[in-house]
Amino acid sequence: MSHAEKAVNYHKDYNCAQAVLAAYAKDFGLDIDKAFQVSVGFGGGIAHLQETCGAVSSSVAVLGLKSGYKEGDGRPKIDAVYDKVRSFTDEFKKVYGTIKCRDLLGCDLVSEEGHKFFVDNNLRVVKCREYIKTCCGLLDKYLAE
């Protein structure tokens, strides 16, 4: 099963951020339950603040795991991760114009009206899963480098 397929499957029960991180967890020796726990707050653009898309946020975490950064590695290793993250988010923006959850969804998840729009238009499936798949596709490319 591909990472995107795993993430979409996880997204049936978990938020977008949890789905992405969990799809890659085993690749980095990360316990799936811990992946769900550590990423739960990133959902909805960080706790429905609708800032950076949760799928993008967890993708940043995966890129960090890929880097293998550890204490004492220093600035060059940090800068390399930052470069990958900027490149990743630039590619996502080329497709969608933004990494901001509110703009990606076109509604305010916290307001009653916005939440109703989200539910009535099935945006969790129609939009969020598209972003999850895009993030996984980009991650697979970056992880293969």
Image (tube, helix red, strand yellow):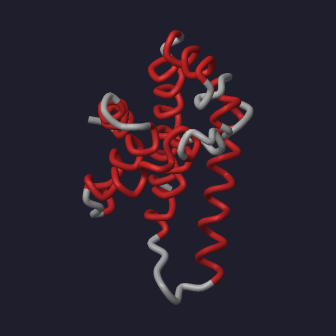
What is the number of callouts on the image? 0
Q: What residue is drawn where x is 35% and y is 50%?
A: 24
Tell which of 62 and 50 is nearer to you: 50
Taking the image as shown, residue 37 lies to the left or right of residue 52, namely left
User: Where is residue 93 shown, x and y percent of the image?
Assistant: 70, 37
Location of residue 94 (image quadrant): top right
Q: What residue is drawn where x is 40% and y is 49%?
A: 21
Tell which of 39 and 117 is nearer to you: 117
Q: What residue is drawn where x is 51% and y is 28%?
A: 128
Q: Residue furthest front?
A: 112
Relative to 17, say whether 133 is above or below: above
Quadrant where the image shows the N terminus: top left
Q: Residue furthest top?
A: 120
Relative to 61, say whether 71 is above or below: below
Tell which of 111 and 77 is nearer to you: 111
User: Where is residue 2 shown, x and y percent of the image?
Assistant: 32, 36
Relative to 92, say whether 39 is above or below: below
User: Where is residue 100 shown, x and y percent of the image?
Assistant: 68, 38
User: Where is residue 79 shown, x and y percent of the image?
Assistant: 66, 72
Q: What residue is drawn where x is 46% and y is 27%?
A: 129
Taking the image as shown, residue 3 lies to the left or right of residue 119, namely left
